[in-house]
Amino acid sequence: MVAETWNLLATRWDFFAGLLLEHIQISLLAIVIAIVVGGIAGILISERQRAARPTLAVINFLYTIPSISMLGFLIPFSGVGDATAVIALTIYALLPMVRATHTGMTNVDPAILEAATGMGGTRWQTLVRVKLPLALPVIMSGIRNMVVMTIALAGIASFIGAGGLGVAIYRGITTNNAAMTVAGSLLIALLALVVDFVLGFVERRVKMRSRAAKRTNRRLAVGGLAACGVAVACALLPGLVAPAPATIHVATKPMTEQYIMGNMLKDLIEQDTNLKVDITQGVGGGTSNIEPAMESGDFDLYPEYTGTGWAMVLKKGGTYSEDEFDQLQAGYKKKGLSWVGMYGFGNTYGIAVRKDVAEKYGLKTYSDLAKVAGKLRLGAEADFFEREDGYDALSKAYGMKFGSTMQMDIGLKYDALEQGQVDAIVIFTTDGKLSKANATVLEDDRHFFPSYECGNVVREEVLQAHPELRDVLKKLDGTITETDMAQMNYEVEEEGKDPEDVASTYLRSKGLLK
């Protein structure tokens, strides 16, 4: 594993370096906001003690909210992406910052403050020249803890389509690439350790009170600010000198095949147009988070499935069939969206049980499963338990009630089945692991699951602004079969190939990519 991780970092450093830079940007922005807001709040409540208890109580309450829940609460207000991640990280960073500032300010020796007042110091002078300098070591300790925590917590930002090293972790889990998960985790840990070391050095310097030490501290502060200024200038200068081309923002769900299709879109669009493509890989929650972001303009394009659009986006009842595609298209048009470029394959749901379970109970169909479901445990991704055509509807259609259920990430379900943590899992018919899994796929004998043909959903506004995009997307019509997609998924999940390479190789085989 160590060798695989090192080799991956060496061969894909451009990929990881980009994620590392995004991680630093997201974390740094949240840290700066937390220092300013939390510092001011800590100073204010130390000067107005009556406000201290309710302020700290509110911040403590926010801190106890699970990070996933916090992201979910924020999405309706700030959408998906970096902005929501920064807001969430700032909220969690406030508690250590406010508490450290308040503690440092209130623990200054009263005798010193009395002496400062006796020498004629105003309240403002006492605060700035006495309290803050004496409280600074405690405040720096709080900042140090807060920064390390924020860098580590920023890894979860990828769940809502933000950047950072969490993208590598989440993608590694989804595609069964343990080396990528380890590499992303290792880089976050190293970044946190490096920053902790630097802040530890700063904390030690702050405690030095000699005149020479203060002069050195001022020089170091000026040098640090200058280095930050140069870094910011270098990041902004290319965009100021040469305006960037128009960018198409592509989103994908947290599924291997979606990573592959996202890269296909990037390759084709950038080859055939002057447009640049920015991919947000593996947005947690899938359609439930991507589609609202499409309507708000955060994303421009993403691969979707017809049955999912019918049930989750248009909220239509009944089992969808491709004969109703015109109705589906009309419904999307009302939302300012359009289906363009149908890939040619379908990826419907299915249910698979472990082979020993199938043999024990003689299971061949869903109706067979319904008779013994109460003795079994079902595993599925969160999306399946919430959608209109998901778990509740399936249970009703077959009179099926499992003994228990387990919510899990898509990339972990086959491992959970193999390890006996669940007895049955919800699958996709193009799953790469399916052909090698210790599983029996059951027959949907009442034809419950609708058709799920895959195509691209794109904003009408983008098509009008860039009409050449429609022609590019139409090139994908009928280019992929279900067997082709399953094979590509297998190459990524079991053979360890990169989705980017698999995507480009397939497009070249079809003569679509030069």
Image (cartoon, rainbow, N blue to C red):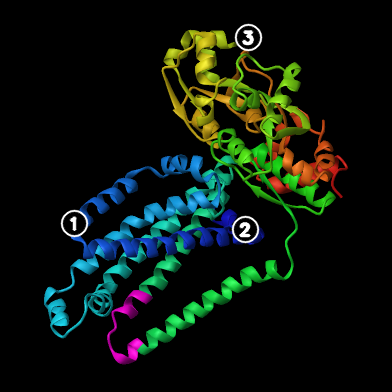
Residue 454, above or below 176? above
Mark closest to the chain's N terminus, 3 or 1: 1
| Quadrant in the rendering for residue 101 | bottom left
Q: Residue at x 64, y 44 (%)?
A: 297
| Quadrant in the rendering for residue 105 | bottom left
Q: Nearer the viewer, mark 2 or mark 3?
A: 3
Q: Which of these two is toward me, 499 or 277?
A: 277
Helix, strand or loop status at disc 2 = helix
For residue 166, side relative to residue 264 (left or right): left
206 magenta-colored: yes
Q: Which residue is mark 1?
A: 50
| Quadrant in the rendering for residue 475 | top right
Q: Which residue is mark 2?
A: 7
Distance CA(mark 1)–CA(mark 2): 57 Å
Q: Which of these two is toward me, 457 or 168?
A: 457
Distance CA(mark 2)–CA(mark 3): 47 Å
Q: Main SS type for the magenta part? A: helix
Distance CA(mark 3)–CA(mark 1): 67 Å
Q: Are marks 2 and 3 in contact (CB under 8 Å)?
A: no
351 magenta-colored: no
Type of amino acid at the residue the image marks with label 2: Asn
Q: Which of these two is toward me, 417 or 181?
A: 181
Q: Is residue 362 visible?
A: no
Type of amino acid at the residue the image marks with label 3: Asp
**Residue range corresponding to the magenta coloring:** 202-214
Q: Are marks 3 and 1 in contact (CB under 8 Å)?
A: no
Q: Nearer the viewer, mark 1 or mark 2?
A: 1
